[in-house]
């Protein structure tokens, strides 16, 4: 019976996971259509003349889907929302303003996808504190509704309606403010719950309630109770529903307990206010209530995001400190090992010499004694060589420049990048290098510089479709310098000579240039049509060392 191949089981597991993901994508859009229609209907009690709803949970569903599956689904969500509104009779695709109405329906999903795309790319390229993972969610949740409202008037100017857009009892400012408030409340109230449930379904987190300490529960609940009581007294005094007490309580809870505590505070305040605002009140009163609620929700969520970002940054700092501590310990161990190696290297060398002499003297001895002498000689020689290598690795020779054979340098660099070359199906051609070319260098650093250049060439080479184009590493002498030339084919975008990072050039090139210049050499780039050429010049120290 043959032994099962673990790689086949791994491939089968990967295939099943991919199939499950495809099934999820297949059922995602119908489920989104059903959820969007349901949430669209739920939001009707908070509607008014000139706007749809001041609490629009469908925006939270849209945001959660784009956050979870990426902005690539934006066109599909636009089409689904347009189909749902057309089937429910909210949009007349056969009317005189069909194009305007259709664009108005698709605009929220488009703006949400654009905001998420921009913020995600900024978070990848920049390390600003306001773009840490917890903060970017809050920024996107605020930015998407604002951009959606800002595009209303440009679309109206480009594609005007033949019928009035807003009712006579409401103006443009109130309508746009209502649009922002409704989407903002829908996103920050519903999207976190949906994303948490998705993580539970994906088994990334367990469906367990967080352990709340009695003092923490008393502190958060007390803050909410006091804020509610103060707001009630202000309301009874004829000042209306004031958002300041709830805003201060939400900010305190968010800063103290993070996003989970912030969402609980938001949920409590939303549950208390929404039933009241759904009653028979004027649209200006409802808008005022929801504007105050939106301010509270935004401040609470951003405060919780800031708290989580600080916790994440502190954990990262602690991890870096632990790594530095380990590095210091390794440095101390290295110094101790160098001292021990220095103490035993001389006795071991003497022992190896004596063992070799003993082995040579046992030529006429019995076979058993000769075999034992040969074994002692071999073991002593191996141990002496090992200690010598350890001394070279841990001693001062590693940190100080020494004569390095260029042929050995090229061979080491090729061995390092060989697995990567095989993985990409490329080949690095080299001619035999003369063994009498030496440079004064720190071997590890100069090898790293050459490896960085080769990897830049490999990155540019990967963009070329022709498999027959190979990379080359040639060595030749020019006067008193040795030139290491790396040549690879490149696409049109990678053949430019500006060194901006296109075609596989990046941080590795800057590091290589710094190392080469520190060794008294220079690094230049001389491109030819369809080729990228790096030239590394180093001074030759002599033909022997």
Image: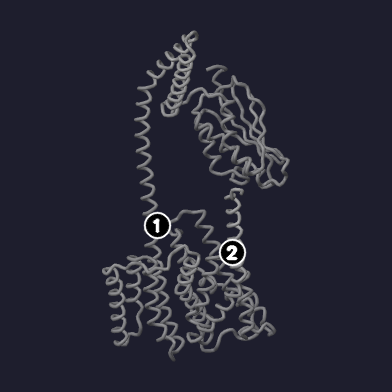
Q: Residue at x 59, y 77 (%)?
A: 33
- Give 393 or 109, whichever is nearer the viewer: 393
Residue 115 lies, in percent from the top left, at: 54, 65
- Give 321 or 375, whichever is nearer the viewer: 375
Confirm or deny contact between disc 2 and disc 1 (CB under 8 A).
Answer: no
- Residue 210 in the image: above or below residue 288: above
Which label belongs to residue 312?
1
Circle 1 SS class? helix
Q: Residue furthest bottom?
A: 280
- Give 367 or 186, whichever is nearer the viewer: 367
- Residue 260 in the image: above or below residue 544: below
Q: Is residue 337 left or right of residue 182?
A: left
Residue indicated by mark 2: 21
Q: Residue at x 53, y 43 (%)?
A: 507
Circle 2 SS class? helix
CA neighbours of label 2 inside 10 A, class few (<14), some (14 to 19), many (20+):
few
Q: Residue at x 55, y 78 (%)?
A: 35
Residue 458 lies, in percent from the top left, at: 62, 41
Which label belongs to residue 402?
none
Q: CA distance from mark 2 to mark 1?
A: 30 Å
Q: Is residue 37 left or right of residue 362?
A: right
Q: Nearer the viewer, mark 2 or mark 1?
A: 2
Q: Residue at x 52, y 61 (%)?
A: 119
- Residue 89 in the image: above or below residue 354: below
Q: Is residue 205 left or right of residue 80?
A: left
């Amino acid at each position: 019976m043959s032994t099962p191949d673990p790689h086949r089981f791994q491939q089968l597991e990967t295939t099943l996971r991919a199939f499950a993901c495809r099934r999820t994508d297949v059922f995602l859009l119908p489920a989104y259509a059903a959820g969007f229609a349901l949430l669209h209907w739920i939001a009707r009690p908070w509607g008014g003349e000139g706007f749809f709803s001041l609490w629009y949970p469908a925006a939270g569903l849209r945001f959660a889907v784009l956050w979870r599956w990426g902005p690539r689904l934006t066109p599909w969500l636009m089409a689904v929302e347009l189909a749902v509104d057309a089937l429910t009779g909210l949009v007349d695709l056969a009317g005189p303003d069909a194009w305007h109405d259709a664009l108005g329906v698709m605009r929220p999903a488009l703006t949400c996808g654009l905001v998420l795309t921009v913020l995600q790319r900024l978070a990848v390229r920049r390390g600003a504190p306001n773009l840490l993972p917890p903060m970017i969610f809050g920024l996107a949740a605020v930015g998407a509704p604002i951009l959606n409202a800002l595009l209303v008037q440009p679309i109206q100017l480009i594609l005007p309606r033949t019928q009035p857009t807003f009712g006579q009892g409401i103006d443009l400012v109130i309508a746009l403010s209502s649009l922002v408030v409704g989407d903002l409340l829908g996103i920050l109230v519903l999207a976190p719950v949906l994303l948490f449930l998705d993580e539970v379904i994906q088994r990334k987190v367990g469906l367990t309630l967080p352990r709340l300490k009695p003092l923490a529960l008393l502190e958060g609940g007390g803050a909410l109770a006091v804020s509610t009581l103060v707001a009630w007294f202000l309301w009874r005094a004829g000042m209306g529903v004031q958002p300041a007490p709830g805003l201060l309580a939400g900010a305190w809870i968010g800063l103290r307990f993070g996003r989970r505590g912030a969402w609980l505070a938001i949920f409590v305040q939303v549950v208390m206010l929404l039933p009241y605002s759904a009653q028979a009140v004027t649209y200006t009163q409802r808008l005022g209530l929801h504007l105050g609620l939106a301010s509270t929700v935004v401040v609470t969520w951003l405060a919780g995001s800031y708290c989580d970002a600080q916790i994440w940054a502190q954990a990262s700092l602690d991890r870096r400190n632990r790594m530095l501590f380990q590095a210091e310990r390794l440095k101390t161990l290295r110094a101790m090992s160098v001292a021990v190696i220095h103490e035993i290297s001389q006795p071991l060398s003497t022992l190896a010499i004596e063992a070799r002499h003993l082995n040579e003297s046992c030529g006429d001895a019995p076979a058993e004694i000769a075999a034992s002498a040969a074994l002692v000689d071999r073991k002593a020689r191996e141990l002496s060589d090992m200690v010598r290598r350890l001394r070279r690795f841990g001693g001062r020779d590693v940190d100080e420049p020494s004569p390095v054979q260029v042929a050995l340098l090229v061979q080491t660099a090729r061995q390092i990048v060989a697995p990567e070359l095989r993985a990409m199906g490329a080949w690095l051609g080299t001619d035999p290098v003369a063994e009498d070319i030496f440079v004064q260098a720190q071997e590890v650093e100069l090898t790293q510089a050459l490896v960085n250049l080769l990897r830049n060439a490999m990155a540019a080479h990967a963009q070329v479709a022709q498999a027959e184009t190979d990379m080359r590493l040639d060595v030749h002498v020019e006067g008193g310098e040795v030139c290491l030339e790396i040549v690879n084919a490149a696409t049109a975008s990678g053949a430019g000579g500006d060194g901006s990072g296109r075609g596989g050039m990046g941080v590795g090139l800057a590091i290589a240039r710094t190392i080469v210049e520190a060794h008294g050499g220079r690094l230049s780039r001389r491109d030819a049509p369809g080729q990228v050429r790096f030239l590394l010049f180093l001074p030759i120290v002599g033909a022997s060392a």
